[in-house]
Image (cartoon, rainbow, N blue to C red):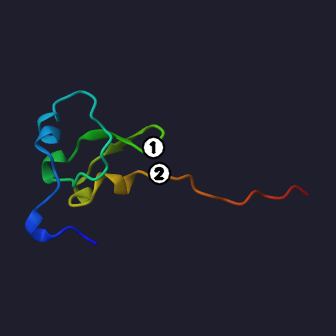
C-alpha cells in the first residue's frame, strides 16, 4: 500500500540538515526525494556495500531505495561445447 497523502513526504529534518557534508552515506532507503536534493551525490547502502547515485530531476517523489538493487541479477551459465 502507498503512503496516505495527508501524512506528507517521509523526509527527516536530520537528513536535510546534513546535506552540506562531503560524503552523504545513507542507510535508510525509505526517504522520499525532494527537489532540494537534485544534482547531488549520495552513497546508498544495498545490504553489502554503498553504491554512488546522482540524484536528477526525474527521481523526485521516488524513494531512495528504488535506484539501488539489493539482489544480484540471475543468469544461466552457458554450456561449454
Q: Which mark is residue 47?
A: 1
The residue that appears at 52% across and 53% down in the rendered structure is 71
Q: Residue furthest right?
A: 81
Q: Is residue 43 above or below residue 63?
A: above
Q: Which mark is residue 70?
A: 2
The residue that appears at 35% across and 44% down in the rendered structure is 53
Of 72 and 55, the residue lying toward us = 72
The residue that appears at 21% across and 58% down in the rendered structure is 60
**Are the two marked residues, 1 and 2, in contact with CB atoms closer than 8 angstroms?**
yes
The picture places residue 18, in percent across and down from the top left corner, at 16, 33
Name the N-terminal-most of marks 1 and 2.
Answer: 1
Of 37 and 39, the residue lying toward us = 37
Report helix, strand or loop for mark 1: loop
Q: Residue furthest left?
A: 6
The picture places residue 16, in percent across and down from the top left corner, at 13, 41
The picture places residue 4, in percent across and down from the top left corner, at 16, 70
Report helix, strand or loop for mark 2: loop
Q: Is residue 13 above or below residue 23?
A: below
Q: Residue furthest bottom?
A: 1
> Could you tell me which quadrant the C terminus lies in?
bottom right
Amino acid at each position: 500500500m502507498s503512503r496516505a497523502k495527508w501524512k506528507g513526504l517521509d523526509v527527516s529534518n536530520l537528513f536535510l540538515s546534513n546535506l552540506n557534508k562531503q560524503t552523504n552515506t545513507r542507510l535508510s532507503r525509505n526517504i522520499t526525494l525532494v527537489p532540494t536534493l537534485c544534482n547531488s551525490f549520495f552513497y546508498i547502502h544495498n545490504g553489502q556495500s554503498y553504491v554512488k547515485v546522482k540524484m536528477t530531476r526525474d527521481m523526485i517523489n521516488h524513494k531512495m531505495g528504488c535506484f539501488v538493487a539489493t539482489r544480484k541479477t540471475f543468469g544461466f551459465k552457458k554450456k561449454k561445447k
